[in-house]
Image (cartoon, coloured by chain):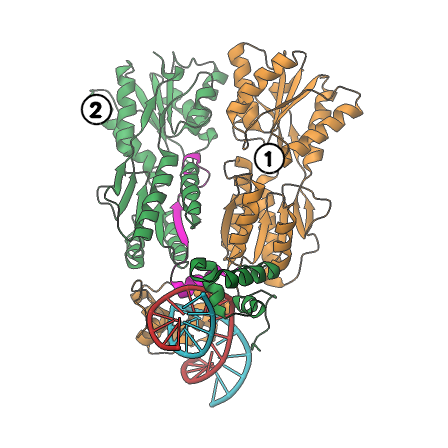
Chain colours: A orange, B green, C cyan, D red
Amino acid sequence: MNRRAKKSSSVTSRDVAARAGVSLMTVSRTLRTPDLVSPATRQKVETAARELKYVPDLAAGALSSKRSGHVAVLLPSLRHSGFLRTVDGLSDTLRANGYHLLIGDCYYSPEEQTELLRLILGRRPEAIVLVSSMDSPEARELLDQAAIPIVETWDWPSDPADMVVGFSQYEAGYALSESLIELGYCNIGFLGGPAHTDPYGEQRRKGHVAALEKAGLRADIHVTVSDTPMEIQDGVTGVSSLRRRFPETDALVCATDMTALGALTECQRRGWQVPGELAIAGYGNFDFAPHLTPALTSVKLPSYRMGKQAAELIVAQIDNGTQPADASRNLGFEIIHRQSTQP
Amino acid sequence: MNRRAKKSSSVTSRDVAARAGVSLMTVSRTLRTPDLVSPATRQKVETAARELKYVPDLAAGALSSKRSGHVAVLLPSLRHSGFLRTVDGLSDTLRANGYHLLIGDCYYSPEEQTELLRLILGRRPEAIVLVSSMDSPEARELLDQAAIPIVETWDWPSDPADMVVGFSQYEAGYALSESLIELGYCNIGFLGGPAHTDPYGEQRRKGHVAALEKAGLRADIHVTVSDTPMEIQDGVTGVSSLRRRFPETDALVCATDMTALGALTECQRRGWQVPGELAIAGYGNFDFAPHLTPALTSVKLPSYRMGKQAAELIVAQIDNGTQPADASRNLGFEIIHRQSTQP
DNA sequence: CTGAAAGCGCTTACAG
DNA sequence: CTGAAAGCGCTTACAG
């Protein structure tokens, strides 16, 4: 007998073994490597397992095999639909390969991020996917020590920790504004969140500024909204503030399609013509972008593909033990011009 | 020495104990119940842990304490923003209480659902939240055997398995269509997914039909779109098909705001007046609903609150060992009339 | 306030 | 093809 009370009448492999009249490790073998077991034995074990509704304790298995079956992803927010697509891509591929995805949502907060990382590392993931940048030295140290494969996504870091499946936020920022310049706009504004809570938006803004400066245009039209993750409402208030402070603006780049939507609807409400008085563009090519009136110009990001390919790299590395040759992948982006920026 | 090679140089509580010059279980105690340890010892252990960057193995802890620290949620899809809000509510509250949320996304597929449930039960969650209904007998048996608290959400089941924090989809369907009848509409259609893949939509439709029949109105205007989760595009094609087959329709209820958005934009594209020629309403009161032109009438669902309260019930039950008195909560819904249904 | 022993439910070599 | 032993990294009573 145990020394403590059982919490519930959980069926263990020992119970299955007893019922099937075999040893405990034959049960384990039947479940994990059925080929190494005689058909008759296999039959007995499978029947016993089914009759007892045996559900193996994965944590116990993880402990002895030193393989948790977990892959973790750390992301700023689940509310951002682009990140969510990445989670989908990860989840689809990982599940198909027998891994479970642990999701760590750190609310765009760097302090929470380190704490969450520690918590997640406590589950001993076999690999970790970063959707948020991991800048704090403490977080870096934890990752180093964990000594597991890391895939960075949603960025193109200059000093990658390990593998990368991403694109350059800076280049996306540069390219979109450059294309607006080509369309003839010359007072181009940017609507984004504060730099420290939205690093990706900040990098897009830097690319945007670089494009304007290269073209000899002014680059000071900048509206900062307070919240992250950015919501529709931030676009509503942001565009009002923009028109008040910089009435000469002829095109507005919004850090995400969500804020662009807010800006667009506020313009409609106020009777400001889009395009015409003001062109509007966003990032993410969210589902609704082509359906708005006017249809929204946006930058299509490889959200799902980043997740899928990150998972593939991880599976390849863990299962084959070797890092694939192309473990740094720049998936790029695509600017999709629609009505909202038509000159 | 171990008989097998260590996978990585993972720091264990034994290492910390050695460094601090105490026993292994004093380390455990320091981390779990610091009050039972002398300040001097605590100091030594904490220093050693920090220096070694010790991250406790939660799976090992779970195994011996028989407490996994996991709470699981099973949901049809992460792509549905209402469900996502529920996940947020769960996650916020559970994390604050030291639990980690395991997310099981079963793609609206009943077969996958049972398999996923088995997988998740393998992680020995201390409670489980169901966002999808669990109809299969096999799933029910697994849940029974697990003998853990269950919270059903997003519904108001007639025979709840355990706790419930939800609302009646049927009543929501009834109430919305009833209110449209009061506004004077009389050829009211419904646009939803197939019954077997979208049970919630189907229940809304049944409520809708009941309201029409009660009022003596026709209840045969029904367009089924193929995909679940329902996307904008389904609204686009759905409304076209509706106008072709039932040109007399004066109001359309869409199973979610996402399809309502598609229907709305398609009407704009075709020049069909909304409202006027066709009133449109949806479910979920998604972020964009008030921002569309015309603003979209929708049913506000207690998405976040269901998650939050489900988590609170779970925490109360696990920590206090007693089930709260009000463990069946009908959180209701709210119909928000906006321009899109203005007579 | 601290420690030695037993055990959580599995898996991994090893031996037969 | 199958089994006895050891161990994964913790925690839980129990004893001092």
**Residue beneath the point at 57% across and 65% down:** B11
Of residues A320 and A10, the one nearer the viewer is A10
Q: Position of residue B96 (x, y in %)?
A: 43, 45
In three-dimensional space, the C-alpha distance between marks 1 and 2, rounded to whole angstroms, equals: 53 Å
The magenta segment: B56-83
Does the image show residue A326?
yes
Question: For numbered disc 2, what is the local secondary structure?
Answer: helix
Is residue A294 part of the magenta span, yes or no?
A: no
Q: Position of residue A160 (x, y in %)?
A: 70, 49
Q: Is residue A233 left or right of residue B273?
A: right
Q: Where is residue A83 in the image (x, y as percent from the top left)?
A: 55, 39
Amino acid type, residue under disc 1 in the picture: Thr
**Residue beneath the point at 54% across and 19% down:** A237
Name the chain letter of the residue that bears numbered label 1: A
Is residue B78 part of the magenta span, yes or no?
A: yes
Q: Nearer the viewer, mark 1 or mark 2?
A: 1
Q: Position of residue B262 (x, y in %)?
A: 46, 25
Task: Say above or below: A274 vs B67.
Answer: above
Of residues B129 and B133, the one nearer the viewer is B129
Does the image show residue B132?
no
**Residue beneath the point at 54% across and 63% down:** B45
Q: Is residue B63 left or right of residue A127?
A: left
Give the residue at mark 2. Answer: B213
Give the residue at mark 1. Answer: A197
